[in-house]
Image (spheres, helix red, strand yellow):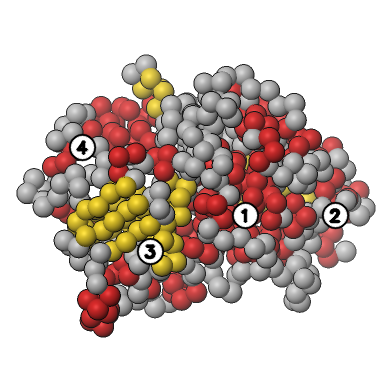
């Protein structure tokens, strides 16, 4: 009576307590997360579907992580969202959950949470914005900003033009409409089988987004009735599918840390090297910014992810189960493609097989680093140059405009202490703009190396996720300006050309940076966060505890 009576204050009739499945709708809506601001409307459509299927929907808030406003980086809070949502899903009397996400970290955060609880779950991402339109051309969120920033620094664009352009870029609800991290992770959720086919690409304002949400409401009731839990969908096969799809769509390098973290919750064996070995025979099929030309709206009209997955044929595990309770193969077997310039045929790909994410190793990154080859300049993929080292992005920004900066097109720009512990939170600082001196000379790319991440909307020859990070005592901390560095992507090598004895002497003289926090979440995070090569989850959050409160049921 207690439970029912208090719920009756919302005006529910007594029939809702007749034993029908109670479906939680975890929404990351917030005005502080503009990419997710329409999710309360999406939730209404989900509720329609749940009612239709005979369930009882109850919407609840989960931490909204807006990529553009949160300091120092939304990534610092991905695990906090995952922890909060996990506890909310477990502690409330739910039978299943619908996960509403959009902006970059909300999708992996909610998938991590659902994985650790193990109740039936389905994801509905909020969808991309409509294409940006500026001066008669399509402009992609994020990607255009990086270019305009460089144009501004080089004097090719005025402040007034930039201010006008920014409104043209963001002209509807939705997340970034390039193949940035949000579009990538929405695609990963679909490739993993955790959201309905086509769900990743319907624009946020398209009526079919809401149709799909209503359908998801029906589907979650079905998943509860058949006890289809996330571990039955997100298997090793599903992760292999997702990794290959990520290569085919030219997806963000951020998918590496997020997929590793989700797999860690499920106990699925997945390693950094899988992201290299599994994609060597996968061409990039999708011609989307930042690597290509088009945007998510075009991708949707061209046939969306099912068209890509159909094109990948036998490279995918077609018998992997999805939330439709059908297999990947059944879902995509008839998926049409309507525009071969956006989604290219396997035999005539946008970029050849093996040009996706590469995993590098060497004495500068013993536990690995990654580079997005499709966003890099081909002439820099084999490169030897002298290091120009900065201990923070801020230190670099202070001198980036200096016309006398000792830098040339062969320099290797190192931005360090940007890893999970270092900054903290592993921000997207790797793709710093080029020094103004080089931009003015027409140089558009140099090799950059960082223990942080790069925005999925960015481009350039940028080595990321160097592990161990500098703040954890990785060799990146020992590099000095003027050292020779060799990047050899075909050989998967990242080398610091300094003798071992010299490195040992430098290590003996190295002192770790002071703690960034002594209390609160940031302290907990820096004490327990793991390195990029295992997904940056907190060590005590990996694995699952089941849905029983007070005891672990797995
Ligand atoms: Fe939210 Fe790009 S800022 S998706």
Of the two numbered discs 3 and 1 in the rendering, the one whose residue sits closer to the viewer: 3
Q: Quadrant of the C terminus?
A: bottom right
Mark positioned earlier in the residue sequence (3 or 4): 3
SS assignment at label 1: helix
Pointer 3 with pointer 4, Cβ within 8 A: no
Return the residue nearer the eye: 8 or 516: 516
Q: Which residue is mark 4?
A: 443
**In the picture shown, does residue 136 fall above or below 129?**
above
Distance of label 3 from label 1 (alpha carbons): 34 Å
Distance of label 3 from label 4 (alpha carbons): 28 Å
Question: Horizontally, is 296 left or right of 46 in the view?
Answer: left
Mark positioned earlier in the residue sequence (3 or 1): 1
SS assignment at label 4: loop
Return the residue nearer the eye: 41 or 342: 342
Q: Which residue is mark 1?
A: 110
Of the two numbered discs 2 and 3 in the rendering, the one whose residue sits closer to the viewer: 3
Q: At x 42% / y 35%, what residue is drawn?
A: 290
Q: Which residue is mark 3?
A: 362
Distance of label 4 from label 1 (alpha carbons): 41 Å
Q: Position of residue 339 (x, y in %)?
A: 57, 19
Mark positioned earlier in the residue sequence (2 or 4): 2
Pointer 3 with pointer 1, Cβ within 8 A: no
Q: At x 38% / y 73%, what residue is drawn?
A: 472
Of the two numbered discs 4 and 1 in the rendering, the one whose residue sits closer to the viewer: 4
Q: Which residue is mark 2?
A: 227
Mark positioned earlier in the residue sequence (2 or 3): 2
Q: Residue furthest top?
A: 136
SS assignment at label 3: strand
Mark positioned earlier in the residue sequence (4 or 1): 1
């Amino acid at each position: 009576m207690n439970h029912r009576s208090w719920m009756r204050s919302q005006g529910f009739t007594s029939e809702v307590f007749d034993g029908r499945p109670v479906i939680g709708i975890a929404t990351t809506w917030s005005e502080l997360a503009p990419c997710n601001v329409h999710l309360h409307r999406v939730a209404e459509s989900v509720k329609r579907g749940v009612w239709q299927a005979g369930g009882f929907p109850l919407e609840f808030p989960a931490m909204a992580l807006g990529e553009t406003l949160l300091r120092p980086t939304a990534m610092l809070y991905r695990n906090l969202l995952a922890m909060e949502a996990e506890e909310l899903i477990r502690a409330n009397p739910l039978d299943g959950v619908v996960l509403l996400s959009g902006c970059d970290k909300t999708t992996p955060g909610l998938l991590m949470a659902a994985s650790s609880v193990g109740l039936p779950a389905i994801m509905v991402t909020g969808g991309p914005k409509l294409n940006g339109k500026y001066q008669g051309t399509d402009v992609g969120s994020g990607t255009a900003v990086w270019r305009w920033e460089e144009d501004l620094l080089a004097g090719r664009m005025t402040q007034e033009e930039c201010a006008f352009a920014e409104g043209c870029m963001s002209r509807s609800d939705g997340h970034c409409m390039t193949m940035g991290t949000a579009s990538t992770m929405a695609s990963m959720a679909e490739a993993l089988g955790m959201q309905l086919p086509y769900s990743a690409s319907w624009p946020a304002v398209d009526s079919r987004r809401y149709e799909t949400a209503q359908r998801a409401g029906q589907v979650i009731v079905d998943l509860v009735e058949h006890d289809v839990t996330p571990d039955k969908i997100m298997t090793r096969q599903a992760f292999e599918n997702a990794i290959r799809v990520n290569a085919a769509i030219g997806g963000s390098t951020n998918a590496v840390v997020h997929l590793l973290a989700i797999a860690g919750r499920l106990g699925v064996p997945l390693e950094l090297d899988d992201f290299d070995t599994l994609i060597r025979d996968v061409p990039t099929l999708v011609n989307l910014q930042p690597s290509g030309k088009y945007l998510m709206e075009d991708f949707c009209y061209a046939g969306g992810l099912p068209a890509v997955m159909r094109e990948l044929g036998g490279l995918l595990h077609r018998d992997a189960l999805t939330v439709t309770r059908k297999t990947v193969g059944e879902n995509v077997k008839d998926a049409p493609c309507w525009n071969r310039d956006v989604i290219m045929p396997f035999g005539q790909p946008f970029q050849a097989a093996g040009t996706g994410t590469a995993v590098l190793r060497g004495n500068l990154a013993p536990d690995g680093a990654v580079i997005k080859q499709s966003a890099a300049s081909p002439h820099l993929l084999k490169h030897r140059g002298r290091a120009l080292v900065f201990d923070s992005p801020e230190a670099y920004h202070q001198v980036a405009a200096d016309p006398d900066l000792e830098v040339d097109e062969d320099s290797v720009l190192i931005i360090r202490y940007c890893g999970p512990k270092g900054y903290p939170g592993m921000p997207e600082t790797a793709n710093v703009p080029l020094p103004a001196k080089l931009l003015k000379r027409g140089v558009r790319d140099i090799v950059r190396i960082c223990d942080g991440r790069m925005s999925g909307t960015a481009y350039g020859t940028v080595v990321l996720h160097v592990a161990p990070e500098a703040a954890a005592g990785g060799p990146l901390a020992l590099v000095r300006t003027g050292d020779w560095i060799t990047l050899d992507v075909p050989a998967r090598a990242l080398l610091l050309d300094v003798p071992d004895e010299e490195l040992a002497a430098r290590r003996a003289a190295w002192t770790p940076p002071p703690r960034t926090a002594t209390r609160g979440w940031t302290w907990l995070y820096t004490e327990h966060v793991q390195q990029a090569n295992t997904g940056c989850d907190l060590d005590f959050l990996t694995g699952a505890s089941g849905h029983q409160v007070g005891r672990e049921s797995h």
